[in-house]
Image: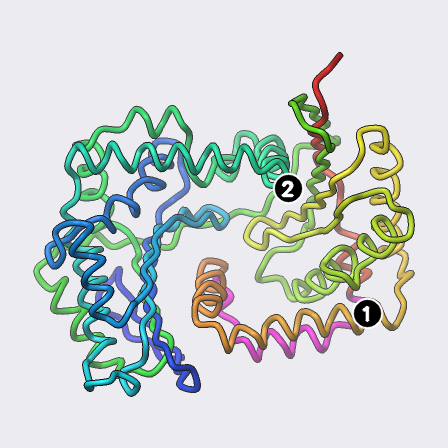
Amino acid sequence: MDSLKINDNINLYYVPMTKLKTTSIGVYIHRPLREKEVSKNALLPYVMKRGCALCPESGSVFRRLEELYGASLSAGILKRGGDHTIYFSLETISDKYAPNGEPLTADSMKLLMSMVFEPSAFDNDTVAQEKKNAVDRITAEINDKRLYAQLRCSEEMCRGESFALPRLGTKEGVEALTADALKEHYEEIIKSSVIDVYVCGGADINALAKQVNDCTANMTFIKAQIPPSSLFDGRGGVKRVTDHMDVVQGKLSMGFRTGTAANSANYAALMVMNSIYGGGAHSKLFNNVREKLSLCYYASSSLVRSKGIMFVNAGIEFQNFDKAYNEILAQLDAVKNGDISELEFESSKNALVNQLEAYKDDQIAMQLYLIDERISGTNYSIDKMKDMINNVTLDKVKEAAAEVKLDTVYFLTGKEA
């Protein structure tokens, strides 16, 4: 990966992925995750993509994408530790495959730069439409009870910390926004945020850097940093929360403190430990809690790298709560005790390595991997991370597992009689 510093805030990264027939450009605007702007940040990218100086309204944006041979454009918001990241992503065919030799990568960069630095859709009607869409996205998360349970567990677990804030903001926060307030927020943050631009495919990084520089040369920036993330250390005893809703299947979400930061020498061992425990069809949760004992419709574990958190999520019958809960903890104890077969150990490492290798064939996944590394401050290459995983020993897995402590138990069950 090559990188060029445009100014104190803007960085350009180029990842040659020339065996693919597409080129993808991603722009990531880093904001601190905080209550006063979480709803504004969540709404902003959807309004910005509706129009810019180059393409003043949605119709002209769509026509421009068609001229770029059906390029795909997306925008949204990420939550990584203390970082609330506004992003834009555009993918089109590589220049060498352009039927008439068009400079598609340069044209794509031009459109994105106008969208990020020259947005024009802050009118009342557009903002009102996107506010409705934002509320619909929040509602969709509530309706997805599997996701909702983990979000509620995270909220309860990290209450009092910024990480408890919802990625999409709140209905009340979104509905209270005005077009003028959103435009003012944009003007405040665009010059005071770290902005990372990733280009994956075949491109001339120096020519692209000139485009970015030309677009921003007359702007004055306030030097910014990537928002920091702190390791979650809990509050003491286990917190237990139960919600009642009109559901036919219980949703169990359990939050654990891992005690292992992303830059820890033992983080790769934690990744392997999580893979063994609940990271896929090879894992203990899948094979024992779900398959052998039939206590769950699904059961898996996942890591929140930037916060040192692990979640276990399971769909269960209401009456099976105690059995499922106890067995989930029993399987964690088995990992802590080193009760791990050679097949489980090797399958778990292979699954992680294969997933990393697959990023080399997926430009958007590659960008997300790199942005996670950037936010975590580790900046490990794919091959470096693969080597770290391959070098993990069983003893290191046990060491990582020993630090994992249950913090919060959330259960979404049916309505009380």
Residue 168 drawn in magenta: no
Q: Secondary structure at mark 1?
A: helix
- Count neighbours of disc 1 (C-alpha within 10 A) and say few if under 14, some if 14 to 19, many if 20 or more: many
Q: Quadrant of the C terminus?
A: top right
> Which residue appears farthest toward the top when viewing the image?
417
Residue highlighted by disc 1: 345
State whether residue 385 is above or below residue 33: below
Q: Is residue 1 left or right of residue 316?
A: left
| Dot 2 alpha-carbon crowd within 10 angstroms: few under 14, some 14 to 19, many 20 or more | some
Circles 1, 2 touching at the beta carbon (< 8 Å): no
Circle 2: element type:
loop
* Residue located 86% across and 53% down the image: 291
Q: Which corner quadrant holds the N terminus? A: bottom left
**175 or 183, nearer to the observer:** 175
How far across and how far down the image is residue 26, in percent?
34, 64
Query: In the image, what residue type sits under mark 1?
Result: Phe
Q: Amino acid at mark 2?
A: Asp
Q: Which residues are magenta?
A: 377-396
Magenta stretch prevailing secondary structure? helix
Which of the two residues, 396 or 295, is positioned nearer the viewer here?
295
Q: Check residue 233 in the rendering and tell me which mark sits there, or answer none.
A: 2
Q: Is residue 330 left or right of residue 400?
A: right
Please tell me in which quadrant of the rendered image residue 146 appears. Answer: top right
